[in-house]
Image: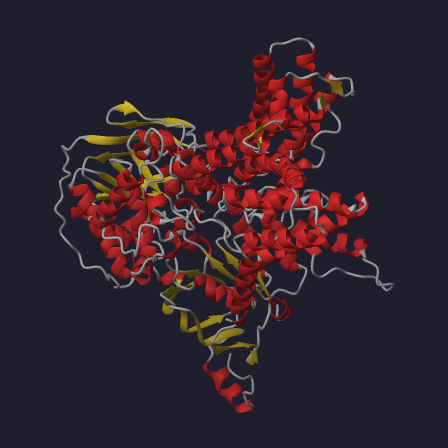
């Protein structure tokens, strides 16, 4: 819970970086690294939120739709001439609403998190499409928004800075705030949390809203990068990339365990993979095949320890 | 199990030794699990057409005995003879083949299959083309179920039937095979009075047809109403056997309890007296499921025991006070004010804490450190402006753990690594740290060895001496007698007796808890 995941996933990251450098001489060029970091940051911001929900013992499939919805809203409101602060506030509020619905379905109506967020994933993707009549909305954003996606501070791209800030914020919340402790406790044993007087519903609401807000922020970065709101295309399958990043990072899907550093590493691994495929000109259909294979290998290596102990434990109980 | 190479001679001598009529004999049956001798050289005889009751306290070995006969477990030693021949009950199929059927408390039915399908599950009839012969099965099932007094449809899903009807299906399932011995574990527990009566009719019918029945129950009146003979187990030993006709309730309870008071009687320094203030008043508490008009008081500095068996409503009372279950009617007052809490967080804020029955599932987060578990209910106190005040938290945890003498290597060790007794102390530490003054402890000594038990009891007395009030739920009456100032007896969701320390008498408490004759009238009401 508190140690950096020095073990398997860092090794995977290092091996991947080394191989990438060998495979393409262009990989370590400044432009490419900046490009890579932009992609990885977007996945990473979403993955950090999903990581929190998974530590809680839940899952969030709706993040991709939140990305599309906030981007569409922002683009549309901006083209309608709404002032910038209002645009940002409404977009993030919309994200928070999805979080409230997710949390409410799970905490009060006892939906399985998978089902609840499957519902909101479909529903809010649809809401964005209905709102924009299915068409992308092109927006001529002001410099302030463009800065979100394309700007840099001292040569470090803004998305990367945001990502680092969010990793640090999440680390702080999960490690030093009471709510973070409660998320781990509910994820480990919800019943014990309840009998111990924890307001389980509040903890769940917090986690789902936090996750949705981060997805909303990612949505703003993406719409800024593209200069448009894409209700149908933005964030497609992003939820699965985010979950893959979390899993590669070593967070257990049954909840109660994991750290934000794992999500950081996982997002970098996913980012490097897609970057490398583009550099090497791997055909899109083969990209998915290789990505799946790499995730499989990463999970096997990351899970090698626990898996082995589970196997030996089973063997010894069988023997006894 | 012993080798089945008995010669003709030993058969003959055994046959002479057997009492006339016994078709099944068990001899020298032993079974041990790591740390527990569940059965130790137990012998049993079963005669055709008799109703035999197997009684004993929790952990006496009744279930193990039943599982041996069901072929679910293999004993370490001893032999079972059927009609004088040694048999091996290596699995449930072997037991079935010998005409022994077992109905567990948890019915083994598949809710989404029909009555008919459930009855023939595991022994489907086939016609000469090897296809399923539903026609034959249907007509056979119709005869069996009519015999059992079930007149509903055979095609309805079992999950939609009442528990009583499901039980009939379970019996019907046993009747599809030639059944010489039917074993049932607490079959009457989920039934109401009328259903129990119907159930007894059926049992007597089976008896007349020559089927022997072994029947586990905790209810004295049922033993005296329907059984022919009683066999008493205690700590894995057979301690008594008698015809019901020669038996009194008091004698039966005496056999069950034995003289095994392993805890020395002690005189605690008691603060509570009749004029100490009432801190908790429960009036006419009724829940739709179980509790019927339960009332009692808890005084400041008092240790109150709720004695009851499983299904007596003991846990439900604590859950209702703690705000987990909504009472149907009745009132709970704490310090004179109405205290109907909407959930555990409110109850804890109101100064009432619960140590749940299932320590591992509901009490502790086993994978997390001692520190996190102790401050689980009081974390808000350690929340600083920017961060949890970890140093203050650790100091408080070490302080309270020292006070309770928790043995742990560090506050950061996962609580799952501690012994059962120390885990229970961590729960007490949490309640102390949450500053509750009413402790509700559900089976606080379950699965804890005797030394640790005494330590827990001493802590409980110490809490009481400092002005806390404690309610302890337990099915082990000796322990309640050891630690409590007063004991309230529960049976089937009703209060059936109350004794103060000077009046404590283990047998009469046991009779009250088991719904003995004295309260037969009461109990008949409770069933309806």
Position of residue B507 measured from the top left corner of the image (x, y, whole percent): 27, 54
Furthest residue to the top? A81
Residue at position x 26%, y 39% in the image: B392
B237 horizontally vs A218: left or right? left
Q: Nearer the viewer, residue A166 or B447?
A: A166
Q: How many labels does the image show?
A: 0
Position of residue A109 measured from the top left corner of the image (x, y, whole percent): 57, 30
- Answer whether residue B292 is visible to the viewer in this image: no
Q: Nearer the viewer, residue A29 or B318?
A: A29
Residue at position x 41%, y 54% in the image: B224
What colour scheme governs how the chains and residues are painted in the rendered image of this protein? Answer: secondary structure
A206 horizontally vs B501: left or right? right
- Answer whether residue A5 is visible to the viewer in this image: yes
**B213 in relation to A275, above or below:** below
**B400 in relation to B85, above or below:** above
Q: Which of B402 and B364 is in front in this view?
A: B402
Position of residue B246 measured from the top left corner of the image (x, y, whole percent): 36, 63
Position of residue B343 measured from the top left corner of the image (x, y, whole percent): 40, 31
B211 horizontally vs B359: left or right? right
Q: In which quarter of the image is residue B373?
A: top left
**B8 in relation to B331, above or below:** below
Q: Quadrant of residue B327?
A: top left
**B135 in relation to A216, above or below:** below
Residue at position x 53%, y 58% in the image: A306
């Amino acid at each position: 819970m508190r140690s950096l995941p020095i073990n398997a996933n860092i090794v995977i990251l290092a091996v991947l970086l080394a191989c990438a450098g060998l495979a393409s001489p262009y990989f370590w060029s400044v432009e490419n690294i900046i490009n890579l970091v932009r992609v990885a940051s977007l996945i990473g911001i979403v993955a950090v939120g999903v990581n929190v929900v998974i530590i809680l013992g839940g899952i969030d499939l709706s993040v991709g739709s939140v990305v599309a919805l906030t981007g569409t809203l922002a683009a549309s409101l901006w083209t309608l001439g709404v002032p910038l602060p209002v645009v940002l506030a409404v977009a993030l509020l919309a994200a928070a609403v999805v979080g409230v619905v997710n949390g409410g379905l799970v905490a009060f109506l006892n939906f399985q998190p998978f089902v609840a967020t499957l519902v909101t994933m479909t529903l809010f993707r649809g809401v964005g499409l209905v709102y924009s009549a299915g068409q992308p909305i092109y927006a001529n954003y002001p410099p302030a928004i463009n800065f979100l996606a394309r700007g840099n501070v001292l040569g470090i791209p803004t998305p990367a800075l945001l990502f680092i800030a969010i990793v640090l914020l999440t680390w702080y919340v999960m490690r030093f705030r009471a709510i973070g402790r409660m998320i781990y406790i509910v994820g480990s044993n919800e019943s014990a949390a309840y009998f111990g007087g924890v307001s389980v519903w509040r903890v769940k609401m917090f986690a789902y809203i936090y996750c949705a807000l981060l997805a909303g922020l990612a949505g703003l970065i993406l719409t800024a990068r593209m200069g448009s709101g894409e209700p149908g295309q933005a964030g497609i399958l992003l939820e699965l990339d985010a979950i893959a990043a979390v899993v590669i990072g070593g967070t257990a899907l049954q909840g109660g365990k994991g750290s934000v550093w794992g999500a950081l590493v996982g997002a970098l691994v996913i980012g490097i993979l897609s970057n490398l495929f583009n550099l090497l000109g791997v055909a899109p259909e083969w990209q998915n095949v290789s990505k799946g294979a790499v995730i499989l290998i990463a999970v096997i290596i990351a899970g090698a320890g626990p898996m082995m102990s589970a196997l030996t434990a089973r063997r010894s109980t069988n023997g006894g | 199990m012993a080798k089945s190479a008995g010669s003709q001679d030993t058969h003959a001598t055994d046959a002479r030794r057997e009492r006339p009529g016994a078709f099944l004999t068990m001899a020298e049956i032993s079974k041990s699990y790591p740390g527990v001798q569940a059965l130790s050289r137990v012998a049993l005889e079963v005669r055709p057409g008799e109703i035999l009751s197997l009684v004993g306290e929790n952990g006496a070995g009744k279930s193990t005995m039943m599982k041996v006969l069901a072929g679910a477990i293999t004993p370490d030693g001893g032999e079972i003879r059927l009609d004088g021949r040694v048999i091996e009950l290596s699995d449930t199929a072997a037991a079935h083949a010998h005409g022994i059927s077992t109905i567990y408390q948890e019915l083994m039915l598949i809710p989404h299959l029909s009555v008919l399908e459930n009855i023939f599950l595991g022994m489907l009839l086939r016609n000469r083309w090897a296809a399923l012969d539903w026609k034959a099965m249907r007509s056979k099932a119709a005869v069996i179920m009519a015999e059992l007094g079930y007149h509903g449809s055979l095609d309805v899903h079992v999950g939609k039937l009442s528990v009583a009807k499901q039980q009939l299906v379970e019996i019907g399932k046993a009747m599809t095979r030639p059944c010489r011995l039917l074993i049932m574990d607490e079959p009457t527990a989920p039934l109401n009075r009328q259903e129990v009566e119907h159930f007894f009719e059926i049992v007597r019918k089976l008896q007349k047809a020559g089927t022997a029945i072994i029947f586990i129950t905790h209810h004295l009146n049922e033993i005296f109403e329907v059984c022919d003979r009683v066999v008493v187990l205690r700590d894995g030993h057979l301690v008594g056997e008698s015809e019901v006709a020669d038996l009194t309730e008091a004698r039966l309870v005496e056999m069950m309890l034995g003289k095994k008071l392993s805890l020395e009687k002690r005189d605690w320094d008691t603060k509570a007296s009749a004029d100490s203030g009432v801190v908790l008043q429960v009036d006419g508490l009724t829940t739709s499921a179980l509790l019927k008009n339960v009332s009692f008081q808890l005084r400041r500095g008092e240790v109150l025991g709720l004695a009851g068996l499983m299904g007596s409503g003991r846990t439900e009372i604590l859950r209702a006070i703690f705000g987990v279950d909504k009472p149907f009617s009745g009132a709970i007052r704490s310090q004179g004010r109405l205290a109907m809490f909407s959930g555990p967080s409110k109850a804890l804020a109101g100064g009432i804490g619960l140590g749940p029955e299932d320590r591992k599932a509901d009490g502790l987060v086993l994978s997390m450190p001692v520190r996190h578990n102790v401050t689980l209910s009081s974390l808000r106190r350690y929340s600083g402006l920017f961060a949890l005040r970890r140093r203050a938290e650790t100091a408080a945890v070490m302080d309270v753990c020292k006070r309770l003498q928790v043995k742990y290597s560090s506050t950061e060790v996962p609580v799952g690594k501690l012994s059962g007794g120390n885990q229970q102390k961590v729960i007490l530490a949490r309640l102390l740290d949450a500053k509750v003054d009413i402790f509700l402890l559900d089976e606080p000594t379950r699965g804890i060895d005797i030394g640790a038990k005494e330590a827990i009891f001493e802590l409980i007395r110490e809490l009481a001496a400092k002005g806390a009030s404690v309610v302890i739920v337990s099915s082990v009456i000796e322990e309640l007698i050891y630690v409590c100032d007063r004991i309230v007896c529960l049976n089937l969701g009703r209060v059936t007796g109350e004794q103060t320390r000077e009046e404590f008498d283990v047998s009469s408490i046991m009779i009250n808890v088991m719904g003995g004759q004295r309260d037969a009238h009461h109990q008949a009401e409770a069933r309806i």
